[in-house]
Amino acid sequence: MKALLLLLAHLYTFSAFEIGKAHTANYEFSNGQWFDGKKFIKKTMYSVNGVWVDKRPERIDSLFDLQNNFILPPFSEAHTHALEGIGHYKQTIEKYLNDGVFYVKNPNNIAPWTKNLKTEINGPSTLDGSFANGGLTSTGGHPEILYEDRIREQVSAYIDNAPRGYFKNKSYFTVNSEKEFEAQWPLILEGKPDFIKVYLANSEDIDGVPPVSKYTLRKGLDPTLVPIIVKKAHKEGLRVSAHVETRVDFLAALNSDVDEITHTPGFYLFSKDELDRYRLREEDAKLAAKKGVFVVTTLLSRNLTEDPGLMPFVKEMQAYNLSLLHKHKVKIVIGGDHAPSPWAEVLALLELDIFDNLTILKMWCEVSPQTIFPDRKLGQFKAGYEASFIGMEDNPILDLTSVTKITKLVKQGHPIEKTINTPPITSHGSNH
Ligand SMILES: [Zn+2]
């Protein structure tokens, strides 16, 4: 009976599959070497309606020959502003998928622009995105200055040369007191954010004298407001991500019970005499692990550092803090903020020389999707998990650059056609 069914089933090589068609059927994926969290093992996998199953279903509708490829769960980008909904967003989506990146998280976007993405993303065979809309900060805090004084000019064609203030209640919400927060909250919820973004920056200076600096130090929310915001967001079922710059910001975020920290302290330095502001301590990393918070690498945010002479100190700080967090088993995830691609962020991580290829792959494939779509079963080849994967010809544990030569893409049982054959950007791009 089984043999007969096999004969009746269609045998597909990958390229022959009908791309884009809805596939609600039973598949067999043979000749793949599947990542088990430590190594690759040869086995046959089965999916039913886009979900992995333990046993071979009685009926197989299609067979896929994975041609001995190495199969990983798809990649993620846990902090990006590349997907926004203006400009060439269709190409951005296409590039992400071709690079094997299926899940992205934008922790500060403009809701009216992001609406343009509605028909393009979050389908079974498309890129999936999660969005915070505008973040919460104090008057004149980050990112108000960035949007009003820099981005406004860059996007003037899209906003009809709108005057300063255009981005208020779009890319940032101003919150200086609990009363202001209560007043803003209905407006924030009206935008239907997937999660809430709060800004902490140089919190230690709020009641004191800021250090002498040639450069303007950013500011954020009054840290005493953050636990109030987190409590309210959690009540609505919304997770909270926090921007941080210093160790004190990091601790304020942890003690407010945020779910994710979108930077590691020290991506920005203004003086080599102030390194203590940024260096985490053992007890901080222990607390982060205990709280279960996710921490995004966001190494390439370091391009915000004005003094290029400080870059070796920035890299040392990033390496120190990330190593310490990893040592205490904090959940580290991959995101490049304004990096040209997540691969550029991974290259920066490799350059720090603190993690081996396997550790980076686990962060990228297994842990990162958990902070983007915490309610979905992603990142594992186990029964009940979404049947999504990427394939490549060489073993990425031995040579990580093999992930830049992806040959197979399947999302929720839907094969996705490779349309771009140029490798992802390999140099570190600029930032703003
Ligand atoms: Zn960012």
Image (cartoon, rainbow, N blue to C red):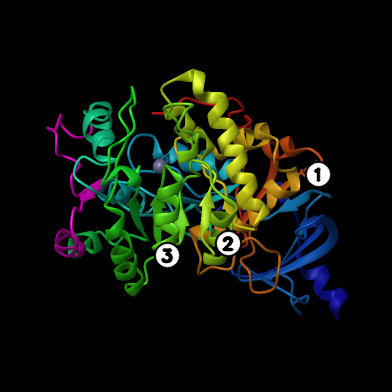
The reply to whether discs 3 and 1 touch (Cβ–Cβ < 8 Å) is no
Question: Could you say which disc has been placed on residue 289 in the image?
Answer: 2
Q: Is residue 232 visible?
A: yes
Q: Which quarter holds ligand 1?
A: top left
Secondary element at image label 2: helix
**Residue of label 1:** 395
**Residue 254: x and y, percent?**
45, 59
Q: Is residue 106 visible?
A: no
The amino acid sitting under disc 1 is: Asn
Predominant secondary structure, magenta span: loop
Question: Is 302 left, or right, of 154 in this rendering?
Answer: right
**Residue of label 3:** 257
Furthest-front residue in this view: 208
Secondary element at image label 3: loop
Of labels 2 and 1, the one closer to you: 2
For marks 3 and 2, the one nearer the N-term is 3
**Residue 180: x and y, percent?**
15, 59
Question: Is 377 left, or right, of 31 in this rendering?
Answer: left
Q: Is mark 3 within 8 Å of ligand 1?
A: no
